Image (spheres, rainbow, N blue to C red):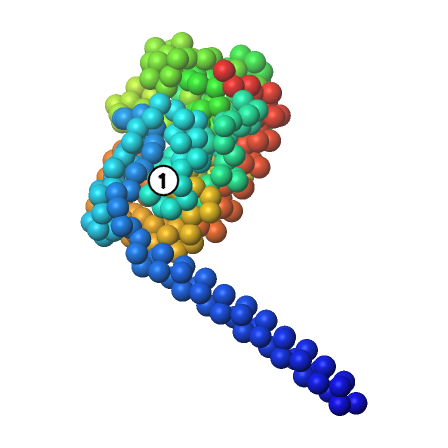
């Protein structure tokens, strides 16, 4: 009996010691994580994005200007030709918060078009925050006898394969917006390819094509001058980019939505305190009235989110466009 009691006591003592060690390890880990967050950043932060002059570069540089002061360190922008190169660089960088990716949703759409990429958009990055969104705008040449989305759908159904739309690169926002429209409306508006959005808009202005789901900046002045007619914006709600213009969903095609998404990413396994610090600083910058105004002038709307919210947005976007690309048989060039 005495031996049994001693054995039980030893067993209890061993379990207590194990629990103490486990608690100590947890406390040390929490302490280390806290220290990482407090010490960050201790050196220059590098933001990798697309080539100069585009939407990705604009978003990256404007946010960089805002966070550099509050983080207390230099923040530099490094431009690379194309999302694949920029994404690969960041996916292979040390997960310490000093190499970040600012890019659009093309990084998770490209794999659906090409099959393989040197990175995995869902496994190789830690999403920090949504940074901006930008709808497209459905625009027609004045010669097209329609005033609403409902009119356009009716006309397209009476002329299957006759109406056409302009689009630049395969898989671009302009292209996908039109294919989503075709699918949801049950119409066949034919794609006329152009080498970029600029030539596509010129083709529409000259009457070579009849419509385009254009990026805001490429057609705003032509809409204002009356050279082109805007029917609707592709966002779910009216956009500050085009005050007073109805949405596609509200004017003839319920449930339709197409917005380009921009976001900030760190390499996977970047410590959560670092991700959270970046999230807070970027969100603070995006909330500034002067920053919001500069975004609008350039054709995008500032928008922030939590890391978890951004993950959910990415997953929903992948499911949506993956299906559109598959159903339409779209292949990357």
Q: Say if residue 318 shows up in the picture.
A: yes
* Crowd class of label 1 (few under 14; some 14 to 19; many from 20; radius 10 Å): many
Residue at left 27%, top 34%? 77
Residue positioned most to the right: 1
Residue at left 49%, top 69%? 24
Q: Position of residue 1 (x, y in %)?
A: 79, 90
Residue in the foreground of this view, choosing between 278 and 308: 278
The residue that mark 1 highlights is 100
* Image vertical order of residue 284 relative to residue 195, above or below: below
Q: Position of residue 213 (x, y in %)?
A: 42, 25
Image-based side of 244 in relation to 317, left or right: left
Total residue callouts: 1
Residue positioned most to the bottom: 2
* Image vertical order of residue 304 relative to residue 1, above or below: above
Q: Position of residue 66 (x, y in %)?
A: 23, 46
Q: Say if residue 132 shows up in the picture.
A: no
């Amino acid at each position: 009996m005495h031996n049994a009691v001693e054995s039980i006591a030893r067993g209890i003592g061993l379990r207590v010691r194990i629990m103490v060690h486990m608690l100590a390890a947890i406390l040390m880990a929490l302490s280390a994580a806290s220290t990482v967050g407090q010490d960050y950043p201790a050196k220059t932060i590098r933001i990798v994005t697309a080539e100069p002059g585009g939407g990705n570069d604009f978003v990256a540089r404007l946010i960089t200007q805002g966070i550099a002061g509050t983080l207390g360190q230099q923040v530099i922008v490094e431009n690379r030709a194309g999302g694949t190169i920029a994404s690969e660089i960041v996916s292979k960088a040390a997960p310490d918060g000093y190499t970040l990716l600012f890019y659009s949703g093309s990084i998770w759409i490209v794999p659906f078009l090409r099959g393989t990429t040197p990175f995995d958009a869902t496994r190789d990055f830690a999403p920090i925050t949504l940074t901006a969104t930008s709808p497209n705008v459905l625009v027609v040449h004045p010669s097209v006898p329609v005033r609403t989305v409902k009119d356009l759908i009716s006309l397209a159904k009476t002329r299957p394969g006759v109406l056409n739309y302009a689009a630049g690169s395969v898989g671009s926002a302009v292209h996908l917006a039109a294919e989503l429209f075709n699918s949801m409306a049950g119409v066949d508006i034919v794609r006329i390819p152009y080498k970029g959005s600029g030539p596509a808009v010129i083709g529409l202005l000259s009457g070579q094509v009849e419509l385009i789901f254009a990026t805001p900046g490429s057609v705003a002045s032509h809409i204002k001058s009356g050279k082109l007619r805007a029917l609707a914006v592709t966002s779910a709600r009216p956009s500050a980019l085009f005050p007073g213009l109805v949405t596609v969903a509200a004017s003839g095609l319920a449930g339709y939505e197409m917005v380009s998404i921009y976001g900030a990413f760190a390499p996977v396994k970047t410590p959560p305190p670092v991700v959270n610090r970046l999230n807070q600083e970027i969100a603070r910058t995006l909330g500034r009235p002067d920053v919001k105004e500069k975004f609008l002038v350039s054709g995008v709307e500032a928008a922030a989110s939590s890391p978890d919210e951004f993950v959910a947005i990415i997953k929903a976007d992948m499911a949506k466009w993956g299906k559109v690309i598959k159903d339409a048989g779209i292949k990357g060039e």
